[in-house]
Image (cartoon, grey):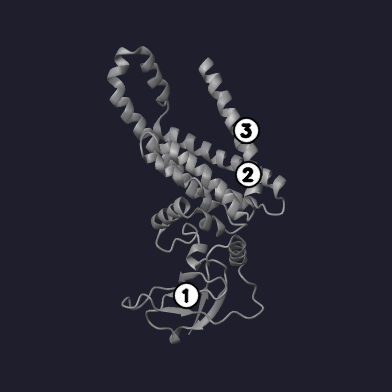
């Protein structure tokens, strides 16, 4: 009986004789893009490492552009060879479930940003990257509200004797219900992500018109938000996470778009300078109110 096996990464399909497969064979390696994936549940779990390889790809089959781009960049940057697993995005291929994939992706962004962003594929759907970004944002919102409530409770005695301090606590407290607050913040950070992606894309179009791709820029900004998870640490966690996210976005754009550091800084430098000036201006206006 013939079994059709389709690679989830590149859609390469091959039919194999199911009767010739070992009972415990459940993992296949795509001959085109080298992606490893589960194609069925094994009948015998005593040999979980058994693996079946599909027949060789015909000579005319096109090579995987993701691997070609990553290897070309590796040679140009004199990096060591990239193992197959470092070319995959766990969040895009959640073999072990979404919680594990989210954790693995966040760790790779935090501690192996160049390799992670170099493996991003262009022209990908934006839904997965947006979902990752929103999860990070919701964690930040939850941590922010938790620590704000904790500090307000600790400092409540001071507010009773200091009217100005009491007024400050009132301004920091939210005036809407928690569900509406979370919904409003989610809509805002989603809008923020798309606006930032458009601005980044425009700047890179000016500096390196032949290298930019909107989906790549969107993915970089979305996954670069991973350090925002440090917001669960009180006091300096949010600040460190913000600075780390900016650094990851700069590194991510450089490696994902395969451009030089000079081009990256030429594109993002004016943008960050504009943001800084707007922030200073907003602070001055707030102090004057």
Residue 267 picture quarter: top right
Mark 3 highlights which residue? 274
Most foreground residue, 115 or 202? 115
Q: Label 2 near label 1: C-beta < 8 Å?
A: no
> Disc 2 marks which residue?
265
Alpha carbons under labels 3 and 1: distance apart: 50 Å
Answer left or right for 1 relative to 275. left
Does residue 108 appear left or right of residue 202 in this picture? left
Q: Is residue 30 above or below residue 278?
A: below
Q: Which mark is residue 6?
A: none
Q: Which residue is drawn at 40% across and 19% down?
A: 168
Residue sitting at x 59%, y 79%: 57
Between 37 and 205, the one lying in front of the other is 205
Specify the label residue 28 is tagged with: 1
Q: Quick one: SS at disc 3?
A: helix
Q: In this view, does 148 lie above or below 71?
A: above
Q: Residue at x 63, y 56 (%)?
A: 258
């Amino acid at each position: 009986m013939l079994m059709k096996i389709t690679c989830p990464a590149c859609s390469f399909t091959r039919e194999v004789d199911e009767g010739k497969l070992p009972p415990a064979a459940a993992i296949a390696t795509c001959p085109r893009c080298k992606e490893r994936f589960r194609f069925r549940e094994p009948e015998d779990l005593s040999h979980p490492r058994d693996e079946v390889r599909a027949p060789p790809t015909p000579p005319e089959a096109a090579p995987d552009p993701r691997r070609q781009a990553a290897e070309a960049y590796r040679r140009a940057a004199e990096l060591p060879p990239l193992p197959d697993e470092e070319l995959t995005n766990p969040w895009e291929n959640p073999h072990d479930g979404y919680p594990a994939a989210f954790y693995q992706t966040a760790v790779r962004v935090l501690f192996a940003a160049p390799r992670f962003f170099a493996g991003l594929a262009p022209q990908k759907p934006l839904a997965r990257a947006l979902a990752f970004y929103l999860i990070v944002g919701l964690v930040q919102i939850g941590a922010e509200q938790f620590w704000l409530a904790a500090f307000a409770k600790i400092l409540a005695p001071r507010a009773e004797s200091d009217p100005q301090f009491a007024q400050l606590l009132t301004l920091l407290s939210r005036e809407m219900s928690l569900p509406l607050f979370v919904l409003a913040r989610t809509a805002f950070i989603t809008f923020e992500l798309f606006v930032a992606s458009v601005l980044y894309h425009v700047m890179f179009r000016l500096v390196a018109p032949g290298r930019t791709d909107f989906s790549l820029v969107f993915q970089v900004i979305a996954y670069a938000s991973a350090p925002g998870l440090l917001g669960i640490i009180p006091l300096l966690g949010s600040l460190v996470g913000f600075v780390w996210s900016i650094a990851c976005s700069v590194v991510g754009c450089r490696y994902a778009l395969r451009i030089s550091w000079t081009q990256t800084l030429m594109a993002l430098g004016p943008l960050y300078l504009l943001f800084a000036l707007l922030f200073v201006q907003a602070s001055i206006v707030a102090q004057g109110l």
